[in-house]
Amino acid sequence: MKKKSKAIYVIVLLVLIIAVILVVGAGLFIDGALRIAIESAGSKALNVKVNVKSADLSIMAGKASLKNLTIDNPPGYQQQKLLELKDAAVAVHPKSLLSNTVRIKQIKLDGANLAIEQKGLSNNLQDLIKAMPKQDKPSGKKLYIDTLEITNITANVKLIPLPGKTDTITLKLPIIKMTDLGSDNKLDLAKLTEQIILAIARGIAEQGVGVLPKEMIDTMSSTLGKVIDLSKDIFGDSQDVGEKVLKDAEDVGKEVTEGLKGLLKTKKQE
């Protein structure tokens, strides 16, 4: 009887050990797959290397988190990294993970630090935007996001050194909030990465008015106008872009801080 009880105990113990191994192994696989998916989609969207130190996904709870996401500079700049993001938290509807469109309740990105380098009239963020590849159709699962919020954004802008003037200016951006992303049914992970970069770039252009060199604001605003087709609505037809940005800075800032709802809708109009 004792031998039989001992045998049952051993079998149960082995089953438990195997179950733990399977659960832990599955968790490692899922987390690793999530990290690789984000790195791949980000690199595809921005045409530079994107790296994520760690990613954690809980399917049952419908939550995911990232730590220390970095985006490399385009070629030709001194520093290796353009952007470093400390934390990202995602809340998703678990059932939607099995459908073609993943429904995300909220994305919170916190602690975005950008190192902007000026080179002539251009800069690394502007060059990154120019090099973004065009993507007409989403690849992989489509996304719909109720709310996306970016907090604690700092941009350290390194200017061309001039005698008697500071060569680095630090900008603190207000909270960027976007809602109803993916309503055009065209949003995927790569497109989402692009939209986040455009929103941050637009925030820098707005905050830099009167602080950064006028020529730098002009060229960055012009690039943004071409990318998101705002040349007529915000910047005007042929007048000086910088002067128009000065005039409309309040409206642009309001759009950034209250939610860039028109970003994807403008894409749809294209």
Image (cartoon, rainbow, N blue to C red):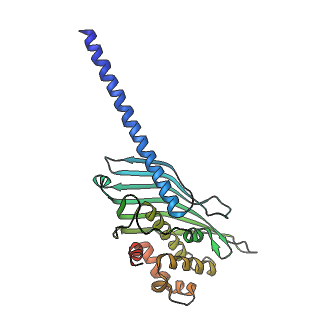
- Residue found at x 47% / y 76%: 228
Asked if 175 appears above or below 69 in the picture, the reply is below
Single out the residue that lies furthest toward the left.
Answer: 1
- Residue found at x 51% / y 89%: 237
Pick the residue in front: 263 or 175. Answer: 263
Q: Position of residue 16 (x, y in %)?
A: 33, 27
Pick the residue in front: 86 or 145. Answer: 145
Residue 158 in sight from this viewpoint: no
- Residue found at x 55% / y 90%: 239
264 relative to 46 in the view: left or right: left
Residue 2 in sight from this viewpoint: yes
Question: In which quadrant will I find the N terminus?
Answer: top left
Q: Position of residue 154 (x, y in %)?
A: 55, 65
Asked if 186 appears above or below 4 in the picture, the reply is below
Question: In which quadrant will I find the C terminus?
Answer: bottom left
Q: Position of residue 195 (x, y in %)?
A: 46, 68
Single out the residue that lies furthest toward the right.
Answer: 163
Asked if 60 appears above or below 114 in the picture, the reply is above
73 relative to 58 in the view: left or right: right
Pick the residue in front: 141 or 127. Answer: 141
